[in-house]
Amino acid sequence: MVKRYHNHTALDGVSLSLRPGRIFGLLGPNGAGKTTLIRIINQIIGPDSGQLLLEGRPLSYADTHRMGYLPEERGLYKKMKIGEQALYLAQLRGLSSRDARQQVRHWFTRLEIQAWAEKKVEELSKGMQQKVQFACTVLHRPDLIILDEPFSGFDPVNAEVLKQEILNLQREGATLLFSTHRMETVEEMCQDVALINRAQVVLSGETAEIRARYSDRSYLIRHEGPLFLPERGVERLPPPANATQATDAMPRSGPSISTQDSTAAEPTIQETRVRLTDGTLNDLLAHCIAQATPLHAVEEIRPGFHEIFIKTVKEAQP
Amino acid sequence: MSKAGWVAQREFMVRVRSRQFIVMTLLGPILFSLMFVIPALLARFDSDTQTIWVHDASGLFTGAFTSEGGVMFREWEQEPAGWRDSLKSGNDLGFLLINERIDLAKPSGFRYYSDQPPGVATSDRITRAISDRIQALKLKQRGLDAGFVDSLRTQVDLQTLRLTGDGEEDSSTTAATLVGFMAAFIMYLFIFLYGSMVVRGVVEEKASRVMEVLVASVRPFDLMLGKILGIAAVGLAQFVVWIALTAGLVAIAQATLLAGAPTADVPKEGVEGIMAGLGTLNLPFLLSLFLFYFISGYLLYAALFAAIGSAVDNESDTQQLMFPVTIPIILAIIVAQMVVQNPGSPLSFWFSMIPFTAPILMAVRLPFGVPAWELALSMALMVVGFLATTWMAARIYRVGVLMYGKKPTFRELIRWITYKV
């Protein structure tokens, strides 16, 4: 895709591929071109050059019936009852009146907003409006669901509901693409990601593969008593500045807070962070095992998307 | 149903069910029928006649002032000095004092006193009565009979006939003027009333940001078309209800409240003349042409209004952009007054060819009869005109609906037409 505006280029040769049944995360700083790309996929605007293919053939306007779209700027008719509104939007997405009615009932029940169906949007809380909007996005059972910043504006409880619904939709066979600034969401939910910066894709691939690629061979060793590191090939890393950063970096690595933690009951357990500059993990482990110091655990410190994101974007800066 | 159809249906249903619409639709006929009923009622109950006292010292004007229409002239026989107190009694309008010596060659010495300045009608009546009497006196001096002079003022009934291919047919200028102006006014009202509804509708969708969801499911052109057609249906429904209810209310009022009362102040012959004149017009033909200009004119302007609505983020910004669009409509109403004077003039011709002014100008001209080729050309231009403006408006619209932020200038709007989206 190439898309140029009056005085700037929004997309400069962006190419992406989504695989069916997976969740694709679209990352990028503000103004990188994410929304432009999302609008092009939704056929709201057209590219200057480039082509959209769905199942190998060019995307047509009729395909919008198979797509659902939740824009970043949420909005519904303020003075229309939410039930009628959802019905209308479903009909615009090609559902017959009967199917639309049935789907509205199904989704309103599923999202626990059925009791408010006769209320107008302006009478509802923000969180409730978000739920209605999400229902409107998916009630025509789209195969491809595009969500622009889906979690913005949701409180933690509703964000969890939304997350579960997204995973349910995936389980039911839908393909999802969403843009987000929340990196932990990417790590938890997306199988594939692309990072757009300054109108270009600077990073793309499977989430796990990218994290592995960005692994800088750093390890965390838990041990009891002093541990002596080899003199060559290993660099000692400073402990993380604060606990939050540690969670950010390793959301799945369990409680790995700091030396003075719940493990304080066994005060001798210590954490050492190292990075291999030469040699293999085996060499390091052999060196450690040779010492009398009891080892408790050794695990890889994988960089989080937060770091990958910042690193990639900063590198791209001139 | 096509997408534009769904959109139109929503526009219609939401508006027709709104409280505002129901109130307006019911209130309108009540106000309209009051406009008919109140003058008639007033004429009926306004039995309080007011008095103008006349003190004629010259004695020349006895019987010159005739009492009618609620104003009575009475002679003041006492000393003129006492009139001031007499004026205080509520029903006395004023006091006319005529000097003892009146020079017929240079009449002066007429004074009218009142605590409020007299209306134009009153002062006209007094001066006319005086000048009529002076004229009669002058004639008498020369030995001529006033009745003979009256008979000189002959009332000529000009029968207006229009030459057509089939021969000649009656035409009534009064009826044509009336019908033409009414149609032009209704067209003007319709374009403004429902055109601004289109603007508000588009702005609402933009301001509430539902637009982005809509344009992901509906092509902007279908969205615009659906809105314009839906609102047209609202307007037609409202007009039909207005006309039916007003007619009904007036009929009921005439049967009950005004039974036996003379209908307002239009003289009977006038009404009959107009009714007879209406008979000379080919009404079904006229109505179908009106309908054509009505619909094409609305479509033309509604598309432009939609484009304007798409360009701004909130309603208060629409005024400035709407102004250039409304100029032709206002111009048309002004020109219409001249066209009535001379329906066949070059001015009439050109303004009824320009699609922006044609709906209103043709409405005025049609009852007078328009040459077939002019009509055909005007209608063809009208179709070309609304297709062209709709195309232009749609191109502005599709850019505008996604633009937020700075309010564009009119020139920028024109530039949007060439944008690729």
Image (cartoon, rainbow, N blue to C red):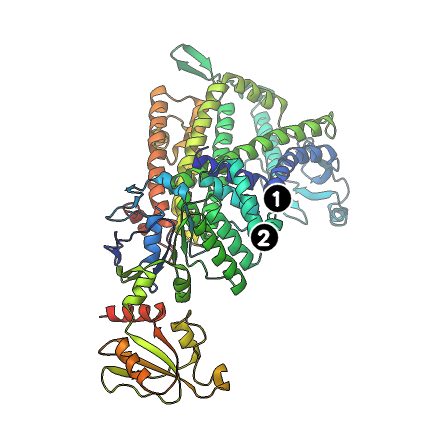
Q: Is residue B370 left or right of residue B136?
A: left
Query: Disc 1, disc 2: CB below 8 Å?
Result: no
Which numbered marker is on residue A45? none
Secondary element at image label 1: helix
Q: Which residue is mark 2?
A: A112
Residue B214 picture location, percent across and down: 43, 46
- From what the image shows, is residue B293 above or below residue B414? above
Q: Which residue is mark 1?
A: B19
Name the front one of labels 1 and 2.
2
Residue B105 picture location, percent across and down: 54, 36
Amino acid on which the number 1 mark rests in the picture: Arg
Q: Chain of mark 2?
A: A
- From what the image shows, is residue B99 above or below residue A285? above
Indicate the quadrant where residue A178 lies. bottom left
Q: Is residue B76 left or right of residue B343?
A: right
Secondary element at image label 2: loop
Amino acid on which the number 2 mark rests in the picture: Glu
Q: Is residue B141 left or right of residue A169?
A: right
Residue at 56 percent of width and 25 percent of height: B142
Residue A248 picture location, percent across and down: 40, 72
Give the CA separation, mark 1 to mark 2. 30 Å
- From what the image shows, is residue B274 above or below residue B39? above
Residue B12 picture location, percent across and down: 53, 38
Q: Residues within 10 Å of mark 2 (few under 14, many from 20)?
A: few
Instruction: Report the quarter where the C terminus of chain A lies.
Output: bottom left
Q: Chain of mark 1?
A: B
**How many numbered marks are there?**
2
Q: Residues within 10 Å of mark 1 (few under 14, many from 20)?
A: few
- Residue B155 appears in the picture as rendered: no
A311 vs B136, nearest the viewer = A311
B313 vs A53, nearest the viewer = A53
